[in-house]
Amino acid sequence: MINVETVRADAAGVLTPPVLELHDVKKAFGGTKALNGVSLSVQPGEVHGLIGENGAGKSTLIKVLCGIVRPDEGAINLSGRAYAPTTPREAKANGLQVVHQEFNLLPYLSVAENIFIEHLPRNAFGVVKRQEMNVGARAALDAIGLSDIDVRWPVERLGIAHRQLVEVARALMTQSRILILDEPTATLTSRETERLFTIVNDLRSRGVSIIFVSHHLDEVFRICDRVTVLRNGETVFSRPIAETNQDELVRAMVGRKLQQQMASEMVSLARPEEALSLVQFRHPQSPHAEGISLQLHKGEILGIAGLVGSGRTELLRAIAAAELPLSGALRLEGAPVSFRSPREAINAGIGFVTEDRKEEGLILNMPIAANVTLASLSDVSRAGILDSKAEIEVTQRLGAELKLKYGGPAKNAATLSGGNQQKVVLAKWLARNPKVLLLDEPTRGVDVGAKAEIYALIRQFAERGLALLIVSSELPELMTLSDRIIVMSQHRVVGELSRPEFSEERILQYAYQGEQQQARH
Amino acid sequence: MQALEKTQASETIDTRRLTGWSPKVLLRDAGIGLALLLLIVFFSLGTEHFLTPNNISNILTQITINLILAVGMTFVILIGGIDLSVGSMLAFCAVVGGTVLTIPDLPVFQAVALATLAAVGTGVVCGFLNGWISAFWGLPSFIVTLGMLNIARGAALQVTDARTIYSFPPSFNAFGSQMIFGIPVVFLIALVLVAIAWFVLSKTVFGRLLYGIGNNEEAVRLAGHSLMFYKVAAFTIAGALVGIAAMVYMARLNIASPIIGIGFELNAIAAVIIGGTSLNGGRGTVIGTLLGACITGVLANGLILFGLSDFMRQMITGVVIILAVIIDKYRERLTGV
Amino acid sequence: MQALEKTQASETIDTRRLTGWSPKVLLRDAGIGLALLLLIVFFSLGTEHFLTPNNISNILTQITINLILAVGMTFVILIGGIDLSVGSMLAFCAVVGGTVLTIPDLPVFQAVALATLAAVGTGVVCGFLNGWISAFWGLPSFIVTLGMLNIARGAALQVTDARTIYSFPPSFNAFGSQMIFGIPVVFLIALVLVAIAWFVLSKTVFGRLLYGIGNNEEAVRLAGHSLMFYKVAAFTIAGALVGIAAMVYMARLNIASPIIGIGFELNAIAAVIIGGTSLNGGRGTVIGTLLGACITGVLANGLILFGLSDFMRQMITGVVIILAVIIDKYRERLTGV
Amino acid sequence: ADKPVVGLVMKSLANDFFKNMLEGAEAHAKKRGDYELKAIGMQNETDFESQLNGVENFITQGVDAIVIAPADSRAMVAPLKKAMDAGIVVVNFDVSLDEQAKKDAGVDLAFVGPDNRGGAKLVGDALAKDLGNGGKVVILEGNPGADNAAQRKLGFEDAIAAGKLDLLDSRTAHWETEEANAVFSTMLTAHPDIQGVLAANDSMAIGVVKALDAAGRSDIKVVGFDNVPAVAPMLKDGKLLATVDQFGSEMAANAIDKALAVVAGGPKLEGWVKTDIKLVTKDDVK
Ligand SMILES: Nc1ncnc2c1ncn2[C@@H]1O[C@H](COP(=O)(O)OP(=O)(O)OP(=O)(O)O)[C@@H](O)[C@H]1O
Ligand SMILES: Nc1ncnc2c1ncn2[C@@H]1O[C@H](COP(=O)(O)OP(=O)(O)OP(=O)(O)O)[C@@H](O)[C@H]1O
Ligand SMILES: [Mg+2]
Ligand SMILES: [Mg+2]
C-alpha cells in the first residue's frame, strides 16, 4: 500500500537526494493515533501537496517537523542527516519555516513588528531599527500584494484574511530551505490565492521546497509537483501530480468514492413566505447611509460573495446582534424585530456559525457534548439541572448525523481536528432548530468528504423550510449550494445572480467592479 | 462505520466527565489529596498532638472561615475573575451583622436571623457591585475589587467609628463552638456550602455556563447567554458567602470589629489555586478548594505544633504554597487532566 | 508603484506610532493625564495649600517609592504576569542593604555602594526566583509571588530577628531629602528609571518581545525565541527595582525594618492599571504608569488637605481607583486605541 | 516530675517591642529553668483569629498556664474562659481584657501590665509642659480598632485637655513609619503652624522626625511611645522630645512569674497588677 519513492530522477536524469525524508513516523496523543506511520520525501525545489481528511494528521506532522511535538517513533532526515528538533528555534535554524493553521500573531503589535518578530532588526545596543523594519515590512507586504494596509497598524485591526497574509509574509522573511504552508488558502479569496501561488512558484524556481496543505484539490493540481495523501495518520499514497487525478486522490483520502452533487442537478427549495428581510440595514462599520437591503425566503439558500474585507462577516454579525447595527430595519417572518443581544436573536430563531471557531465558536477545553448543547441548554435540563444523559444523546445523534469523528462526547473539543471542530459548531446550531441560519465560511478548513456531507445537510435544512444565509470565499461552494447569490463590495450589494446566471467570472466581475467604483470616488 | 463504533464504545464509560466527576477528575483531586495526606502523615509522626481528636476539631474550626470564603472565590476565579475585597467585605458584613445582633430587647432567634440577613445582604450588595461594575464597563475585576477593598474597609470603620462590637447573645456564641461527634458545627455548615457549590457548579446549567465563560466568553455570548447575568451572579454569590463567613466569625470570636479580615483574600485565593483551579478561569472544582483549604489549615496548625519559629513558619508556608502548585503540575502532566 | 509611493508617503508621517508615541497613543496617555489634571484642578480650587511648591515636592517625594515599584511591576504585567511579593521583597532588600550600610568603620561611599549592591542583588535573586519558578514549571505568577510574599517577609524577619536597623551614615540620609530646584532628588532618580524603562520597552528588541509575550506567548515561542529568558528577565528587573526602592526608602526614613512595605504591591499594581496597562499583558506604557502613580499620590495628599476623615479618605480612594479605570475605558471607546 | 509548661501568646513577633518582650521571657525561662516556655505570635496585629487558634492549640496541648497579650480585648474572653474551664492558669498582660466582656462571660481574670492610657498621658504632659498653654498639636494614631491605639489616643486627649493644648488634626498612620512620614508631611502643609506632634508609637515618630528634617523644621516637638532602640539617637540630639518605656522585656517575664506562682498553688491573682512605665527623655540616653 505504501508507495514512497525516496529519490526521483530530475530532468537531467541525475538522482538528487531528497531534502527531507520521513520514515514511518508515529505519534499518539493518549489513545488517539494522530500519526500512525507517515513516510514521505521532499525534493529540493518541489511543491509537495499534503492532503487528507480532517484529522488525518497533517497539522500534527507539521508540528513534528517544526519541533512543537516530538514523535514517538520513526526517523526524519534533513539533507541526509538525522533531524529531531526539540524547539521551533532549532527547526528554524535548520531552514524550516512554517505558516501554521492557527494564527500566531501578536494583536497589539504592529504589522511590521509581527513580520519581523523572528529577527527584529537591531543595532549594536539592541535597539530596534524601526525605519528599516517598516520599509522591509512594506516591501514584504507589497511582494505578496498587500499594499492597502499600513505596516504600522496593530494587527488587531486586520480582518482574518489579511492576518493570514501577514503570516505568509512573515514566513517569507527568512531564507528557508523548506517552507510549510498549513491551509494558507482557507481564509483567502481567489485574488489573494493567486498572489500566493505566484510567490510559491517564484520560491520553487529558487530551489526552495514547499509543503502545501490544502483541502482544495484544484489548488493542489495547479501548484503541486507531487502529492502525498494521509489517511488516519498513515501515508496511503505519494506520487507525482501528473500521474494522478482528482478522483483517485479523493478515493485515497476517504477510502471510498464520493458522489458529487452539482448545482445543475438541484432545484431551488425556496418557498414564497419571507423568512428574513433587511431594509437599509447598516452594520457598525458601514460607511453608507443606504445600508444593505435583501430578502430571504423560507427554504432558500442565499449566498453572499465578495472579496476579503467587503463587509460580509460584519453583516452577519450585525444580523445575529453580535454587534449592534447602526440603523435600518430587520423583519423576521414578516414581523419587524430588533435584537439587542445575541440572546434575543437566538430566541427569535437565528443561528450564527461564526468564521473563527477557535475564538468565537467553541469552548476548546470543554467536552464536545457541552459545546453541542451550549445554545440549547434548556432542552437538556430540567429546572436548571443538567441531564447528562440527554446531553450525550443529543451529541450522539448529531454526531452521527454529521459523521463526526470523535473520541466520545466527554472528550474536550480541543482534541478534534479542525474540520471536526467545525462540525461541532454546526451541531450546536442544529440542536436548536433555528428558522434562519447564518453561516460564515462554513467549510473553512473542512475536508472534501466532510464538505459534501455538510452540503447535503444544508440542503436538508432548506428542505425543512429553514432559511440559510451563507458567506463563503469559495465560489464553487457558493455556486453549488445557493439558490441565489448576492455580491458585496465595500459594504454594498453590487450585484445579484440567480442560479442560471452563476459563474465565477460574473461574480468576480461584480466584485472587482465594486472595488473600482470605490477607488474612483 | 469505524467512527460510529468508536463513539459507542466510549459512550458507556463516562457520563460523569461532563459533570466534572470522572475517574480522571477524581484523580486530579486525589493528587491534591495526596499532598494533604503527606502533610498529615508528616505532622502525625513529627508532633505529639497533631492527630488527637481535639486538634483535629481545632483544625476544622480554624479552616472554616477560609473555606467559606474560598468557596465563593472559586465561583469568581472560575469565570476568570478575582476578588480582592473579601477580607474587607468580611469586616463590613460583620459590623453590619453585629450591629443588628446587638439591638437591645430582640429575642435571640430573631436577632440572629435578622443579623444573618443583614450580613448576607451587605455581602450581596458589595458582591453585586463588584460584578456589575466589572461586567458593565468591562473592567478587570482585579482593579474593581481592589477599589472595593478600600471602600468596604472604609465603610466598616466609618459605621462603627473604629469601635469593636461585642456582647452577642450567649447562645449565638455557644453555637460557634458547638460540636457534633467532635466535629465543629460551623465546619459542617461550611461542608454543606461546599456540597451546594459542588452541585451548582457541576450539575446545573448555571454552573456549566460559569465554566464556559471562564473558558471562552465570546462563544458563550454568541450562544445566546447573558454574560452580565452570570458574571454578576458569580460575584454576588461570593459576596453572600462572605456574609455567611462573617456570621461564623462572630459566632466564633464573639466580636465584630472593622479591622478583621485583613489579607484573608490572599488566603482564600491560595486555597482555591492550591486546590487546582486555574487562575485563568474555566477549570477547577470546589472539592479541590476544600482540599486546598485543608492543606493551608493543616500546615498552619502543624507548623505551630512542630514548634517552628514564626518567621520560619512564614517562610515554609510560602515554600509549601509554591510546592503545592508544582506537585499539581506534575500530576497534571502524568494524568493529562 | 502605487504601493511604493504609499509606503514612502506614510513613512514620513509618523514613525512615532510604533514607538508608542503617536497622536492616538498620546491621547491614550493624555486620557489618564486628563484625569490627573482634573484631580489637580479640583484640589487646587478646593484646598489652600495644594499647589504650593512645598506641597508639590512633598507629593513627589511621597510617590517616589511607589513609582519605582510600579515601573518594575509594569514589566511584569506587560508579559501577563503579576508580582505580589514586592512589598515583602522591599523589606527584605532593605534589611539586607541596611545591614551592609551599618557595617562599622566602612567609608560612607563604599558602604552605600556595597549596600546598594546588596539590596539590588537581593531583589535580583528574589525576582529571578519568581520568574524562573513560574516560567520553568509554567505556574501562574500570582501564586508563585504569593509564596515569595511569605518567604521574603519571613526571611526579612529571620535575618534581623524582627529588629529595626538604624543609624545610617548622615550623608546618606541627607541625600534622601536633597532637592534640586525644589524637586526631590529621589524623585529625579525615579524619573530616570521611568525614562530608561520607556526606552527599553518601546525601542529595544528586548522590550518589543516582552510586549509580544504579553500578546501571544505561543506565537513568540514559535518565532524561535526563548520565553524563559524574557519572563525571567521581566521578574528580575522588577526585583532589581525593588532593591533600588529599598535604598530610597532607607535614605528617606533612615531605618530599615522587616515589617515595612506591607500592601505596597497593591499600590504598585493600582498605579500600573490606572495608568492604562492591561492586566492581561501586551498593552500599556510606562508613561501611563508614571501618571497612574501621580494620580494615587495626588489623591492621598489632596484628600488629607481637604480635611476628610481617615475612613472617608479610604472609601474615596477606592471609588477613585474604580473611576479612573472607568474614565480610561470611555477614552478607549472614544479614541479606539 | 515534669516541668510546668507555659504557653505565651503574643500579639505579633514582628516588631522590636514584642521581640524584646519575647526575649525577656526566654531569658527568664532559662534563668529560672523550672518551666518550659512555648511562645506563639500572629501574622499581624489584626489577625485575631490566629491568636484564637493559638489559644485553642495550647488548650489541646494541655499547657499548665497561658500567658496572653490579647490582640483584642473582647474576642479573647471566650477562649480564655474555655482554657480556665480546662484547668489552665490564665494570666492576661500587656493589654487588659475588657471589663464588661469579662463580666458578661463570668470570667474573673487579673491583668498584669502597664497603663497605656496613663503612659500616653505621661508623654503628652511632657509635650504640654514644653509647649505651654495653647500649643498647637496633632496626633498620629495607631491602627484604628486596636485597643492600645484607642487607649493611647485617650491618654493623649487627656493630656491635651489638661495642658490646654489646641488639637488641630488627628489621623491614623497604622503604626507605620512610611505612612506617618507621608501623612504628617501633608498635615504640615495643611497646618504650617503645628508646634507639637503626639505619635502613638515610635515607628510613626521616626517618620515624623524624618518629615521635619526634610521640611527643615526644627521648631516642632515630637513625642512617641515604646522607646524602641532606633529613637535613642533622636532623643539625644533633641529631635524627639520624649517617649515612654513600658519595659516590655520584663513584662512577659513578670506575668509568667505570676502565672507560675498560681500553678504552684499560690493564691489567685486579682485586679490590675500594674507594671512600670517611665517617661524617657534626652537625660535618659547616654
Ligand atoms: N494535542 C492533541 N491532543 C490530543 N489529540 C490531538 C492533539 N493534536 C491533534 N490531535 C488529534 O490528532 C489527529 C490529527 O489531527 P491534525 O490536527 O493533525 O489533523 P489535520 O489533518 O490537520 O486535520 P484538519 O484538516 O482538520 O486540520 C486528530 O484526530 C486530532 O484529534
Ligand atoms: N477591528 C477592526 N478595526 C478596523 N477595521 C476592521 C476591523 N474589523 C474589520 N475591519 C475592516 O472592516 C472591513 C470588513 O471586514 P469583514 O471582516 O466584515 O469582511 P469580510 O467580507 O467578511 O471579509 P473576510 O473574508 O476577511 O471575513 C474590512 O475592511 C476590515 O479590514
Ligand atoms: Mg490541520
Ligand atoms: Mg469574513
Image (tube, coloured by chain):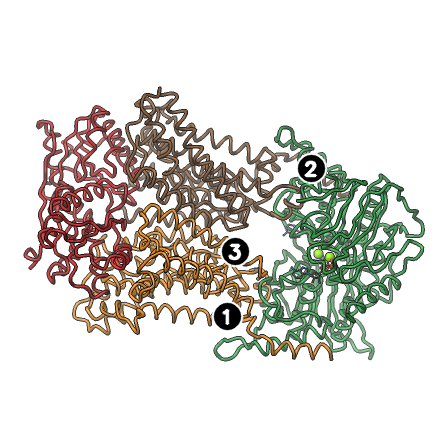
Chain colours: A green, B brown, C orange, D red
Residue under mark 2: which chain is it in?
A
Q: Is residue C114 left or right of residue B133?
A: left
Q: Secondary structure at mark 2?
A: loop
Q: Nearer the viewer, residue C227 or B247?
A: B247
Rate crowding at label 2 as few (under 14), some (14 to 19) or many (20 or more) other CA atoms within 10 Å.
many
Is residue D27 in sight in this rendering? no
Instruction: Measure the alpha-carbon separation of dots 3 and 2.
Output: 31 Å
Circle number at residue C280:
3
Dot 1 beta carbon under 8 Å from ligand 2? no
Q: Which residue is mark 1?
A: C202
Residue under mark 3: which chain is it in?
C
Amino acid residing under circle 2: Ser
Instruction: Measure the alpha-carbon separation of dots 1 and 2.
Output: 47 Å
- Decide which of tag 1 and tag 3 comes sooner along the chain: 1
Rate crowding at label 3 as few (under 14), some (14 to 19) or many (20 or more) other CA atoms within 10 Å.
some
Q: Which residue is mark 2?
A: A376
Q: Secondary structure at mark 3?
A: loop
Q: Nearer the viewer, residue A456 or D32?
A: A456
